[in-house]
Image (cartoon, helix red, strand yellow):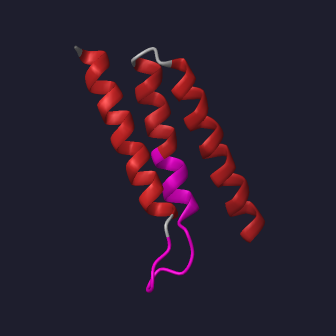
């Protein structure tokens, strides 16, 4: 039961991360820091639920967000 909750929580974190990466009329640049944090939270949730494939994917996406942030600076 707890692993199902962690999977749901991880999926919610992924949705939040994708929201941070979207741009809009008033938001011209993606927020890579917030997206990376949400992907890291999702990875932690998937790790707790022992879903290691999704955990790995989230960690790779978080690393990608951090590298994109560094390139901007």
The residue most toward the left is 1
Residue at 61%, 44% (x, y): give it: 61
Q: Is residue 27 above or below residue 8?
A: below
How far from the left and from the top, in percent, is residue 39?
Answer: 50, 43
Residue at 30%, 32% (x, y): give it: 8
Magenta highlight on residue 35: yes
Residue at 54%, 19% (x, y): give it: 52
Q: Quadrant of residue 56?
A: top right
The residue nearer to you, when weighing 15 against 47, is 15
Q: Is residue 23 left or right of residue 59?
A: left
State which quarter of the image contains the C terminus. Answer: bottom right
State which quarter of the image contains the N terminus. Answer: top left
Please give the count of numbered marks on the rendered protein. Answer: 0
Q: Is residue 67 above or below residue 40?
A: below
The residue most toward the bottom is 26
Q: Is residue 38 above or below residue 72?
A: above
Magenta highlight on residue 55: no
Magenta-highlighted residues: 23-38
How far from the left and from the top, in percent, is residue 34?
Answer: 49, 57
Q: Is residue 55 left or right of residue 14?
A: right
Asked if one can make out residue 56 in the rendered structure from this viewpoint, the answer is yes
Q: Is residue 59 above or below residue 16?
A: above
How far from the left and from the top, in percent, is residue 42?
Answer: 44, 36
Residue at 49%, 32% (x, y): give it: 43
Asked if one can make out residue 73 in the rendered structure from this viewpoint, the answer is no
């Amino acid at each position: 039961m707890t692993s199902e909750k962690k999977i749901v929580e991880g999926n919610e974190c992924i949705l939040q991360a994708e929201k941070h990466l979207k741009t809009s009329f008033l938001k011209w640049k993606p927020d890579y820091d917030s997206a990376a944090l949400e992907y890291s939270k999702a990875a932690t949730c998937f790790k707790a639920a022992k879903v290691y494939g999704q955990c790995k994917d989230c960690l790779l996406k978080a690393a990608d967000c951090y590298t994109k942030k560094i390139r901007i600076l």
